[in-house]
């Protein structure tokens, strides 16, 4: 058995990486990581070359990302006849590319030779490559390791200080600590392992208790109505269903009195018509607008160069009771291969029929603020713009709350919508800001600056939800002031200590 394991270690790393996905939302089988992450560090420490260490990390990462991002392929199944064949390619591509972000840290960890140094370096390098993943090739910081604790807002409060990357560092240090015992098998390793795990758990719990109890949460006198029609993605852009979909939004919006509502909010591309052009639908929509408030809706806007050339933009409109467009926001961080194709004109001919199904959206400008009379200043984000730590607001001109419109209907009843919600929750705690999240098929809710959810409209649930907006915090969070400087400094300190241990004579 031991010989088989030694011969098939890469396959075992792949399998363990794949199984470890169960620690992520919405499954939260968190204890798995004490086994899987420790096994990976143990394998790296026993590797006789950086090349082998890279292979172990890469195959672990291949399994982690191929299965952790498998929900992406669900979008292809909306038109399974034309695009379904790409599903396995999506799994392979996710694992093959993103596996590098664990393989490279594993190879660099091997450099430190001594297990205690490797332990510190391994956790820090993993997190640094999580951060690199947030901006390389436009970025995709999905399923950060710190998200495995999001089953309880109490355990997430440290991200107000260190950010999600800092929480990832703590999780990795704790979950990889058992490897030290299996490497050394002595009392010192047992002491360091148990002390590390207990200290990290105690720190996360006590900080969570202290923050949630010492800062009172209050609600404002602003009431918002979230509207979730739960229209299947297969019907959302069906020409025969467009008007019915539009009328369903209106029907739900006015199904309860609007007199005491300040904002009615619809999701991403909720309105199937360009309201700045098709005025007859703008007249209809006034039925869904509060008498003294506003409607916020997502839609596709068009900028025309001339009669033949135009650019679509994934946008958000704010309308008053008279049907006037008060202001708008255009999504700035577009989804590659979803809203545009990178280097489209250089693609081979055989793939072009597939890419023609994807629009070429134009990006807008980030961090726009809205100033409406008698209301706090707020900002907007559309869809996956919310997943980027330290990038969702302009710190020099901070809004009092954020509106996040999204449509996770592409991904069905999968892990994707739940993980997207967790990303939004983490951003709320990091920045200490209320985020209003409205999704076509769910999950729609209001998230307080402490990461607590209002009542939710669950996945695939049709309905409306009236919520009083939480008040803003009186002070900014530490992470809200300094951003990723804090977790990256901690990572570099870890690497410095690892280097000192490595240089120290035994």
Image (tube, helix red, strand yellow):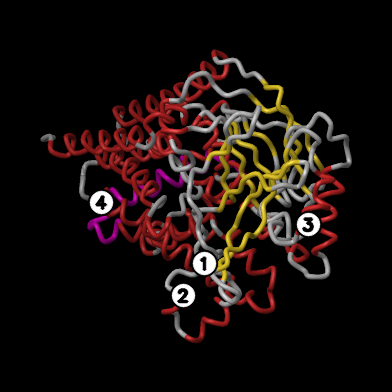
State the CA–CA distance, disc 1 to disc 4: 34 Å
Q: Nearer the viewer, mark 3 or mark 1?
A: 1
Q: Position of residue 375 (x, y in %)?
A: 64, 29
Q: Are marks 2 and 1 in contact (CB under 8 Å)?
A: yes
Seen from this angle, which residue lies furthest top? 214
The magenta stretch spans residue 284: no
Q: Which mark is first along the chain, 1 or 3?
A: 3
Q: Position of residue 28 (x, y in %)?
A: 59, 41
Residue 443 appears in the rendering: no
State the CA–CA distance, disc 2 to disc 4: 35 Å
Q: Residue at x 63, y 75 (%)?
A: 83
Q: Which mark is residue 344?
A: 2
State the CA–CA distance, disc 3 to disc 1: 24 Å
Q: Secondary structure at mark 2?
A: helix
Q: Which mark is residue 108?
A: 4
Q: Secondary structure at mark 3?
A: loop
Q: Are marks 1 and 4 in contact (CB under 8 Å)?
A: no
Q: Nearer the viewer, mark 3 or mark 2?
A: 2
Mark 2 crowd level (few <14, some 14–19, many ≥20, 10 Å Cα): few
Q: Which mark is residue 149?
A: none
Place residue 494 in its image quadrant.
top left
């Amino acid at each position: 058995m031991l010989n088989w394991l030694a011969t098939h270690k890469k396959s075992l790393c792949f399998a363990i990486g794949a199984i470890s996905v169960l620690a992520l939302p919405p499954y939260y089988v968190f204890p798995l990581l004490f086994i899987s992450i420790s096994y990976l560090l143990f394998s790296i420490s026993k590797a006789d070359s950086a090349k082998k260490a890279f292979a172990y990390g890469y195959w672990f990462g291949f399994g982690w990302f191929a299965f952790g991002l498998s929900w992406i392929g669900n979008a292809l199944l909306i038109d399974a006849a034309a695009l379904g064949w790409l599903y396995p390619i999506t799994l392979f591509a996710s694992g093959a590319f993103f596996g590098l972000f664990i393989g490279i840290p594993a190879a660099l960890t091997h450099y430190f030779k001594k297990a205690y140094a490797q332990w510190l370096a391994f956790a820090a390098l993993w997190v640094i490559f999580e951060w690199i993943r947030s901006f390389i090739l436009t970025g995709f910081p999905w399923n950060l390791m710190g998200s495995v604790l999001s089953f309880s807002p109490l355990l997430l409060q440290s991200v107000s200080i260190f950010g999600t990357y800092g929480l990832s560092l703590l999780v990795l240090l704790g979950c990889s600590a058992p490897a030290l015992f299996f490497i050394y098998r002595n009392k010192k390793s047992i002491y360091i392992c148990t002390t590390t795990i207990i200290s990290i758990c105690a720190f996360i719990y006590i900080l969570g208790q202290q923050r949630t109890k010492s800062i009172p949460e209050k609600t404002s006198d602003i009431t918002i109505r979230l509207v979730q029609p739960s229209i299947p993605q297969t019907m959302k852009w069906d020409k025969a269903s467009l008007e019915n979909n539009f009328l369903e939004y209106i029907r739900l919006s006015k199904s309860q009195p609007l007199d005491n509502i300040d904002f009615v909010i619809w999701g991403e591309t909720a309105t199937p018509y360009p309201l700045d052009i098709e005025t007859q639908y703008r007249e209809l929509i006034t039925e869904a607008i509060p008498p003294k408030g506003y409607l916020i809706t997502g839609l596709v806007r068009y900028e025309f160069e001339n009669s033949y050339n135009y650019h679509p933009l994934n946008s958000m409109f704010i309308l008053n009771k008279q049907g006037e467009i008060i202001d708008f926001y255009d999504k700035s961080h577009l989804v590659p291969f979803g809203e545009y194709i990178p280097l489209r004109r250089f693609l081979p001919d055989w793939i072009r029929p597939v890419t023609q199904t994807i629009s070429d959206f134009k990006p807008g400008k980030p961090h726009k603020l809205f100033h409406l009379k008698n209301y706090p200043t707020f900002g907007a984000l559309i869809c996956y713009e919310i997943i980027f730590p330290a990038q969702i607001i302009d710190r020099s001109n901070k809004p009092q709350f954020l509106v996040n419109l999204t449509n996770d209907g592409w991904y069905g009843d999968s892990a994707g919508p739940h993980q997207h919600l967790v990303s939004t929750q983490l951003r709320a705690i990091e920045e200490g800001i209320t985020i209003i999240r409205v999704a076509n098929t769910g999950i729609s809710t209001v998230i307080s600056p402490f990461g607590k959810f209002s009542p939710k409209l669950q996945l695939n649930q049709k309905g409306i939800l009236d919520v009083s907006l939480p008040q803003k915090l009186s002070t900014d969070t530490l992470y809200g002031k300094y951003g990723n400087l804090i977790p990256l400094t901690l990572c570099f300190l870890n690497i410095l200590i690892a280097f000192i241990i490595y240089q120290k004579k035994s």
